[in-house]
Structure formats: C-alpha cells, structure tokens
Image (cartoon, helix red, strand yellow):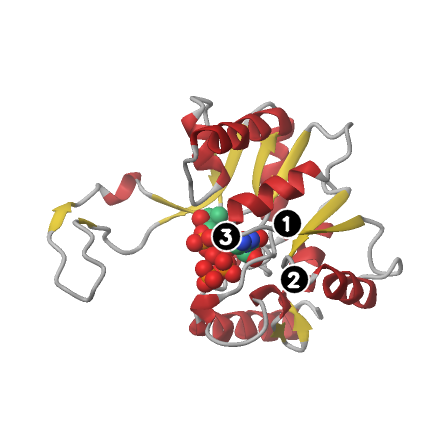
C-alpha cells in the first residue's frame, strides 16, 4: 500500500495518509478496507520516508489483533509513487505469487471491489484494474501549463474511456518485471498497470466503485466525510 505521498494537492498539513477522516488517519481506513477482504493475508504499508515509526505506532493503536488478523508490515517509501511501490514489493515474503497495489489515498474502497480484483487475478488474469466509465468529455491538448489557453488536439471517444482506480491486482512476477523495466529505461507511469502494458502483457478492467475515489483535493475530504457519515448511519461502521 503506497502511503508515502506528501499530499501537495490537498494543501498544507501532515503527509496525506496521516490526515484524519472522522478522527482516524486516512491510512488506517485504507488498511482496514483491505484487511476486510479474505483474499488479503498481508498488508505492506509504504510510509513517508521519515515517518515509518509514526505509521507503525498509529497502526498498532488502531488495528490491534482484536480487529484484524491480517499481518501488517511497515517500510519507508521513496521519492515517487513508483519508487514506493517498488520498495513495498521488495518487502514481500518469497512465497507470495500475487499482489494487490492499493493507494492509501483511496481509503473507502468497498470490499466488493477488492474481492473482484483478487478473484480476477486468482482466475488467471496477469493484471487487473478496477475502473469506472468517465462522465465528462475528455480532450487532448497541447500542454502549456502556465494558465494560457491550450489548443485542443483531439477528443477520444468517451464510451471507450475508463477512469482507473486501485487496488490493482497482478501476478507478482509480472509486476516485478514491469518495475524492473521502468528502472532500466528510466520511464515513468502514473499507475502500475501502465507499466505492465509497456511489457506487452494484457491488462483487464473489472467494475470499480464510486466510493473507491482518490482523496486528492480538499473537496474530496468533504465527500469522504459524507460517505463515512452515511456508512455510520446505515451499516454501523
Ligand atoms: N512518493 C510517493 C508518492 C505517492 N505515494 C502514494 O501514492 C498514492 C497516490 O498518490 P497521490 O494521490 O498522488 O498522493 P500524493 O503524492 O501524496 O499527492 P500529491 O501529488 O498531491 O502530493 C498515495 O497513497 C500516496 O501516498 C507514495 O507512496 N510515495
Ligand atoms: C494509481 C492511480 O490511483 C490510478 O488512478 C493514480 O494513477 C495515481 O495518480 P497520482 O497522481 O499519483 O495520484
């Protein structure tokens, strides 16, 4: 679970994964969400580089043996998400053959989504991503990036686009090979499946979920609090 990001887009404050949602660190919500799935036996949390001790303490405080029997390991993360995922993969025991990579920044992913990704990997897909159809029309532009008007270069057909979430599921050897290739070639990608695509390995999409959204900007915190309030009222947690 990459959790080492700073959360620049969320604004000033603690590293994003440590910020509170309904009084509990976002990371704790995310670990609980993954541990709810019977497909998950170990969670490797990749903490902010100078925050591994703090993360260990928070997890011990909030996810004791009474709550979950899932093992939780904490390792320090890296400069980029890609680096952090690679450091997390390096901490896996030798007998692991499949892995789910889940952003701590998607703390409210429902267990049904985790289970759907895990099931598709178990049934033989080497790489699986949960995703939703997009509701906006998407334009390609010539990036100017300084507030100037940006010329439109194309409009991809919306019905073929999907907004990709996590957890993304992989055969471990496929994901390890994809990360190794990225290290060799010095290329980046914004998600793990993107790296696997470059290997020429097929990636498949399963249905994602609205509540698996990524907490990125301040408005996302408002949405997350609303989802948690609804869950407390209807499900009791
Ligand atoms: N060096 C990094 C950067 C990101 N992440 C993790 O990758 C996930 C998705 O990243 P994002 O939402 O972009 O988080 P931040 O990098 O924290 O956000 P920002 O770009 O706004 O700083 C998050 O769980 C984040 O903690 C990570 O483990 N290591
Ligand atoms: C992995 C991811 O969450 C899939 O949508 C996304 O690509 C992460 O992007 P970010 O810019 O690091 O938040």
At numbered mark 1, what does the secondary structure look like: helix, strand or loop? loop
Question: Measuring 68% from the left and 63% from the top, which residue is drawn there?
Answer: 51
- In the rendered view, does 223 fall on the left or right side of 45? left
Indicate if the residue with disc 1 has its beta carbon within 8 Å of ligand 1.
yes
Identify whether 57 is placed above or below 85. Answer: below
Disc with the residue nearer the chain's start (2 vs 1): 1
Identify the residue at image location x=50%, y=52%: 209
- Please rate how many residues cluster around mark 1, counting C-alpha atoms within 10 Å: few if below 14, some from 14 to 19, many from 20: many
Q: Residue at x 12, y 62 (%)?
A: 149
Of mark 1 and mark 3, the one earlier in the sequence is 1
- Residue 201, x across and y down, in percent: 46, 23
Instruction: Say whether mark 3 is within 8 Å of ligand 2.
Output: no
Identify residue for label 2.
27
Q: Is residue 33 above or below residue 219?
A: above
Q: Quadrant of the C terminus?
A: bottom right
Could you say where residue 20 lies in the image, as x and y percent from the top left?
Answer: 63, 74
Is residue 213 at least partly visible in the picture?
no
Q: Which type of secondary structure does the marked residue at label 3 adopt?
A: loop
Q: Residue at x 10, y 53 (%)?
A: 151
Figure disc tally: 3
- Residue labelled with disc 3: 209
Q: Earlier in the sequence, mark 3 or mark 2?
A: 2
User: Observer-nearest residue: 192 or 107?
Assistant: 192
The image quarter containing residue 114 is top right
Nearest-to-viewer mark from 1 and 3: 1
Q: Is mark 1 in CB contact (under 8 Å) with mark 3?
A: no
Front-lying residue, 124 or 141? 141
Q: Which residue is mark 1?
A: 1
Let me know if residue 67 appears in the view. yes
**Residue 110 horizontal/vertical position (percent):** 60, 54
10 Å neighbourhood of mark 3: few (<14), some, or many (≥20)? some
Callout 2 touching callout 1 (CB < 8 Å): yes
């Amino acid at each position: 679970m990459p959790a080492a990001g700073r959360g620049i887009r969320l604004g000033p404050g603690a590293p994003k994964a440590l910020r509170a949602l309904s009084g509990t660190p976002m990371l704790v919500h995310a670990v609980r969400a993954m541990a709810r799935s019977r497909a998950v036996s170990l969670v490797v949390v990749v903490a902010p580089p100078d925050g591994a001790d703090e993360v260990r303490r928070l997890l011990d405080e909030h996810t004791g043996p009474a709550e979950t029997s899932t093992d939780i390991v904490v390792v320090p993360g890296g400069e980029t998400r890609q680096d952090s995922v690679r450091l997390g993969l390096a901490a896996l025991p030798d007998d692991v053959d499949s892995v789910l990579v889940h952003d701590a920044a998607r703390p409210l992913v429902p267990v049904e989504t985790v289970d759907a990704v895990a099931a598709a990997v178990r049934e033989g897909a080497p790489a699986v991503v949960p995703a939703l159809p997009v509701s906006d029309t998407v334009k390609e532009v010539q990036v100017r990036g300084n507030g100037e008007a940006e010329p439109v270069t194309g409009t991809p057909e919306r019905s073929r686009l999907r907004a990709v979430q996590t957890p993304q599921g992989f055969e471990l050897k496929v994901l390890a090979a994809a990360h190794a290739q990225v290290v060799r070639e010095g290329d980046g990608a914004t998600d793990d499946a993107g790296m696997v695509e470059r290997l020429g390995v097929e990636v498949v999409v399963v249905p994602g979920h609205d509540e698996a959204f990524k907490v990125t900007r301040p408005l996302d915190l408002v949405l997350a609090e609303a989802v948690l309030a609804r869950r407390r009222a209807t499900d009791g947690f």
